Image (tube, rainbow, N blue to C red):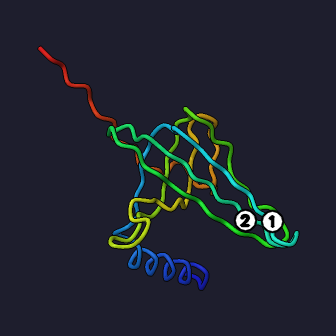
Amino acid sequence: MGFKEKMQKYYTDNYIKKYGDRMTQFQGNILSTKIEEKTILWIFHKITATIIVKPDTSKMVIKCSYTKGRWFKRPDFIQVNQGHKVIVMGLKGEKGKDGSELITIMNLINLTTKVDLVPIDHSQLKKMKQPTPRMRG
C-alpha cells in the first residue's frame, strides 16, 4: 500500500468515525427546487440550492440544502427540475441544533438525466430496496 492510499484510508476512516451516524441516503422525486447564486466583488462566487424531495418509501417530504463557495469561478450544480427522480447522499443535521431536519447534500444523482453532482462509480451504489406492494384479498 503506497503513501497515497494510506492517506486516503486515514481520511476516510476519520470522516466515517466523525460523521458515520449522521450519514444518510434516500431516493425520491423532486417537489421543488430553488437555486440562488451570489457574487461578491466579482471575485467570490457562492451557490445555494434548496431542494424538497418526497422519498419513495414514505409520505413525508425532506428538505435538503447544498452550499458551495468558490474563488474566481462559478461553482457548478446539476440541472434538476420538478418531477425528476434523484438519489440524495448527505448528512443529517445535529440533534438539538438549528436545522436538525435539514439534510446537507454531499452528492446528488439525477436518475432522470443520469448526471451526478460529484462523479462516482455507479457500480458501487447499493441497490435501493423498493417497497413491495401488498395484495389485498
x%, y% of residue 100?
39, 65
Q: In front here: 51 or 26?
A: 51
Q: Amino acid at mark 2?
A: Lys
Tell me what residue is drawn at x 56 percent, y 35 percent. Answer: 84
x%, y% of residue 89?
48, 56
Q: Specify whether 88 is left or right of 75.
A: left
Q: Which mark is residue 39?
A: 1
x%, y% of residue 18?
40, 79
Residue where numbered disc 2 is placed: 46
Disc 2 and disc 1: Cα gap in Å? 6 Å
Tell me what residue is drawn at x 56 percent, y 38 percent. Answer: 111
Name of the residue lying farthest toward the right: 42
In the rendered structure, are the residues bearing label 2 and label 1 in contact, judged by CB atoms less than 8 Å apart?
yes
Answer above or below: position of 131 versus 35. above
Crowding near the residue tagged with mark 2, few <14, some 14–19, many ≥20 C-alpha atoms within 10 Å:
some
Tell me what residue is drawn at x 40 percent, y 41 percent. Answer: 55
Answer above or below: position of 20 versus 7. above
x%, y% of residue 21?
34, 69
Q: Amino acid at mark 1?
A: Thr
